[in-house]
Amino acid sequence: MKVEDFVKIINSEFYTGVPDSQLKALCDYLMNVYGIDAKHHMIAANEGNCVGLAAGYHLATGKVPVVYMQNSGEGNIINPVASLLNDKVYAIPVIFVVGWRGEPGVHDEPQHIYQGEVTVKLLDDMGIESFVIGTETTTEEAEGVMERFRGILSKGKSVAFVIRKNALSYEEKVKYNNANSMKREEIIQHIVAVTGEDVIVSTTGKASRELFEIREALGMEHKYDFLTVGSMGHSSSIALGIALNKPDSKLWCLDGDGAALMHMGAMAVIGHNTPSNMVHIVINNCAHETVGGMPTVADTVDFVKLAEACGYKKVITVDSFETLDAALKEAKNAKELTFIEVKCAVGARKDLGRPTTTAIENKENFMNYLGLK
């Protein structure tokens, strides 16, 4: 189905979401038509944030908003759906558009398998009636479903369209970029050159994939790294948990701007605990690149001031390999909580692979290296 037809069928004037590769056609369409426009389209920090924005929009206009997201975001919406939108509370109607990663019977990465199994069940449990759109779904069928959904929405209840792989199409191309010059894979190469055998916790998406391939290219083992393949936004919390319990180990967290924004409160907890053995690096390309390159709001966020306000002892931002190398070497020898923001370009190799070890193997090798098995 063409995304233009899908949007016409929904007939909403306001969209907010967290980008998803399964919904790239919709995301690209919204960026082409609206860009980032507070009246029509906002990319939020996390899916719960989206629900709050959608509720505010409805309260101010009386109209029905759309929240789009990957199915991994269902966990982030459970509380606001149950305690805000629900018809037993404020009865605020929302149309959810959910990308179905890990659909049973469709090959996907390990972090999506269980989430894919429970995607529709979670919607059912939240009282959200859903309809699955696949490549075979016709516009006439979708129109009929939307007509029925309007009756549900009029009662203050929410509905959802669950989107299968390649179900939506969009012919226009959108190019995402910024003015930064350093590429993330090269940044991680510089980080690995300094960290040596120190422990690394890397964030969801291409950063972990690149770290894995860099280790392969160098003939190094992977036991030093915990690759956070799912749970976007929680790598820094994982890193804190390790740093506090392994105070004699140097711990580096490789984070992304989208992930750091998603659960920004983690930085306050890190700063409060002030682990002297931890270095938190945010590689900031102002984009949700792993799912297509759509922008984050990181271009207007001063991460360095934020980290300083949260209690990090040493904070710095770098935009060249010369300043990066100097900051890494200083952090390597420092015995204080350090934050480094690295300004990064948008883009990755088209032939970038994925880890060839399983998530369980990664965990066991990592814990062995920490001396626990």
Image (spheres, grey):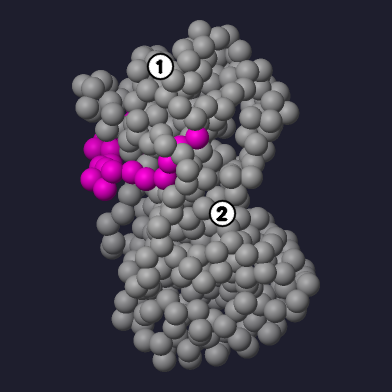
Residue 71 placement, left or right of 212: right
Compared across the picture, whether 87 is left or right of 31 comes to: right
Q: What residue type is labelled 2?
A: Gly
Q: What element carries label 2?
A: helix
Circle 1 or circle 2, nearest the eye: 1
Dot 2 surroundings within 10 Å: few (below 14), some, or many (20 or more)?
few
* Rendered image quadrant of residue 198: top left
Q: Which secondary structure class fits the magenta region best?
A: loop
Label 1 packing within 10 angstroms: few (<14), some (14-19), many (20+) = some
Place of residue 328 in the rendered image (x, y in percent of width and height, measured from the top left)? 47, 17
Q: In the drawing, what numbered circle is on residue 15?
A: none
Label 1's element? helix
Which residue is depicted at the point 48% across and 55% down?
294
Q: Is residue 167 visible?
A: no
Magenta residues (range): 343-364
To which residue does mark 2 refer? Answer: 75
Q: Is residue 287 above or below residue 155?
A: above
Q: Where is residue 361 in the image (x, y as percent from the top left)?
A: 30, 32
What label sits on residue 195 in the rendered view? 1
Q: Do the residues labelled 1 and 2 touch (CB within 8 Å)?
A: no
Please provide percent x and percent y for residue 29.
Answer: 46, 70
Point out the image quarter for the N terminus. bottom left
Q: Which of 178 and 107 is in front in this view?
A: 178
Q: Quadrant location of the C terminus? A: top left
Label 1 vs 2, first from the N-terminus: 2
Where is 355 relative to 64, above or below? above
Magenta span includes 250: no
Look at 44% across and 83% down and name the residue there: 5
Q: Where is residue 249 in the image (x, y as percent from the top left)?
A: 48, 12
Q: Residue at x 70, y 79 (%)?
A: 63
Residue at 62% in and 65% down:
37
Is 367 rendered above or below residue 163?
Answer: above
